[in-house]
Image (spheres, rainbow, N blue to C red):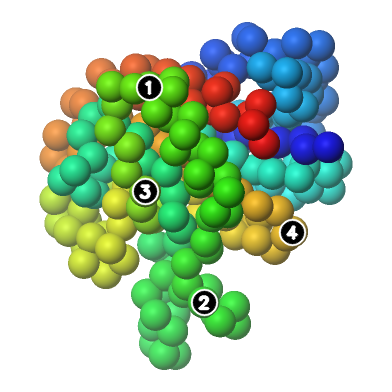
Amino acid sequence: MSRTGIIGAMELEVEQLIAELENDKIIKKAGMDFHEGLLNGASVIIVRCGIGKVNAALCVQILADIFHVTHVINTGVAGSLNAELDIGDILISKDALHHDMDVTIFGYQPGEVPQMGFREFKADESLISLAEAACRKANPDVSVVLGRVVSGDQFISSKDMKEHLISAFQGDCAEMEGASIAHGAYLNGIPFVIIRAISDKADDSAEMDYPTFEKAAAKHSAALVREMVREI
Ligand code: ADE
């Protein structure tokens, strides 16, 4: 039977889903509340991991070791790096990488974690298909793009950094947890997908747009996850 770990970095990214959980049982670990229960009839653990890559990595390991999850979904918001992705639109991960990993001095590609033999963590094909189908159903008016998530411990709010993330990594959206969740899921052999709704354009307008649009954007990705889990 499947058991899906659903991770959001912030309260607003998971609060709507937690409110809908049946038989909600809370287990505390590493300062995080793991909500175990049934979402739309599916067995899930929903957790707010906190912001950044360390929190995200710890969270995945706990989901693997303590809760024995069979799948991982990361939901939340992101800054757009792709002109086709406007505020409110959704990105489903094809893959994810760490944009702040740099061991290029020893011949590795920008973003490549040494000794792994590859740079991009690939999302699970069947979770990608389920996410696409669920998005069409839950958010029929929202555009969906399949693309690359680039993650780092940095909120992206300048044109220069945005251009760097596009030219060096061909990123489609920037956020602060996805690659760590992908990395942790890969090391534990757990299929994953990242679903991010766009809250800002990761440029000089991000400071204004992010607080204005984060709530509506988070609602879009939560609606998709609710629809998707029962098919896993
Ligand atoms: N999450 C939402 N918008 C973001 C941005 N511009 N940079 C990093 N993380 C984000």
Q: Is residue 90 above or below residue 142?
A: below
Query: In the rendering, at what x and y percent does residue 181 appear?
Result: 59, 50
Instruction: Please name the residue that numbered disc 1 is placed on.
Output: 139
Q: Is residue 212 above or below residue 175?
A: above
Secondary element type, mark 3: strand
Instruction: Please name the residue that numbered disc 2 is placed on.
Output: 118
Q: Is mark 2 within 8 Å of ligand 1?
A: no
Q: Which numbered disc, 1 or 2, marks the residue that appears first in the sequence?
A: 2
Comparing marks 2 and 3, which lies closer to the viewer?
3
Q: Which numbered disc, 1 or 4, marks the residue that appears first in the sequence?
A: 1
Marks 1 and 2 sit apart, C-alpha to C-alpha, by 34 Å
Kind of residue at badge 4: Asn
Instruction: Please name the residue that numbered disc 4 is placed on.
Output: 188
Res. 156 in view? yes
Per the rendering, the mark at residue 146 is 3
Q: Which numbered disc, 3 or 4, marks the residue that appears first in the sequence?
A: 3
Comparing marks 3 and 4, which lies closer to the viewer?
3
Q: Quadrant of residue 20?
A: top right
Per the rendering, the mark at residue 42 is none
Comparing marks 1 and 2, which lies closer to the viewer?
1
The residue depicted at 38 percent of the width and 22 percent of the height is 139
Res. 50 in view? no
Q: Is residue 168 above or below residue 176?
A: below
Q: Which numbered disc, 3 or 1, marks the residue that appears first in the sequence?
A: 1
- For label 2, the crowd category at 10 Å Cα-Cα, with few meaning under 14, some 14 to 19 and many 20 or more, is few
Marks 4 and 2 sit apart, C-alpha to C-alpha, by 16 Å
- For label 4, the crowd category at 10 Å Cα-Cα, with few meaning under 14, some 14 to 19 and many 20 or more, is few
Kind of residue at badge 3: Leu
Kind of residue at badge 1: Asn
Q: Which numbered disc, 2 or 3, marks the residue that appears first in the sequence?
A: 2
Disc 2 vs disc 3: Cβ atoms closer than 8 Å? no
